[in-house]
Amino acid sequence: ILNQDEANMNTLNYDIVIIGGGPAGLAAAIEAKKSGTDKILILERDTRLGGILLQCIHNGFGLHHFGEELTGPEYAHRFVEEVKNLGIEYKVDTMVLDISTVSVENSNFPMHIVSAINTKDGILSIQAKAVVLAMGCRERTRGALVIPGTRPAGIFTAGSVQRFVNIDGYIKKKKVVILGSGDIGLI
């Protein structure tokens, strides 16, 4: 249990806090900055910005925005570099624990309190005028995909395999069976 002085030690103030450092969060931060907002913070739970794009090593990204065909990591890198060049603050390896809203005396607008934690800063209390939720999506669970059993060894969802191979560099088997013909499975 923290006393009041300890609780206030890591209190930060921002105009906008963006939860999620993937493509949507990066784009939101860039547009907010270009629209005149200066105090922006991106919170990302992974160890680096980029989100799902980092595991999408195939081409096909960037045609509309950059006018050229890029891989997912190349596309993400351009957005991350723009965030850095614009001086937008971010914290990676940071888990958001809670978002609450409190009334502000003599104001028509509430204040949002984002509670987060990481190993560098410890527990953070971040006050924000606005919070953008850009946490991406999740692949359906094994159960929702109707994969039977309680612990089927060696059976992975397509997104998990994509991360294991493209980001973590794990190649467990030489022969695989892919069930289904969705985009990610084919890639």
Image (spheres, rainbow, N blue to C red):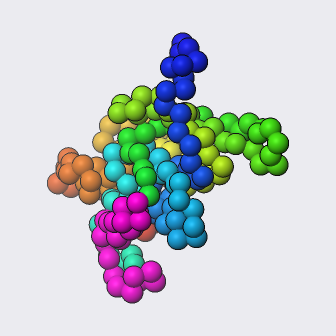
Q: Which of 54 and 36 lies nearest the eye of the viewer?
A: 36
- Look at 34% across and 50% down and name the residue there: 48
Q: Which residue is drawn at 75% across and 44% down?
A: 110
Q: Would you place residue 84 above or below residue 18 in this image?
A: below
Query: The C terminus is located in which quarter?
Result: bottom left
* Residue 92 on image: x %, y %: 38, 45
**View extreme (left): residue:** 174
Is residue 65 within the magenta segment?
A: yes
Judge whether residue 182 is colored magenta: no
> How many numbered tags mark residues here?
0
In this rendering, would 123 be left or right of 67? right
* Quadrant position of residue 69: bottom left
Q: What stretch is highlighted in magenta?
A: 63-87
Q: In the image, what residue occupies the spot 30% across and 42% down?
A: 154
Say if residue 64 shows up in the picture.
yes
- Toward the viewer: 14 or 144? 14
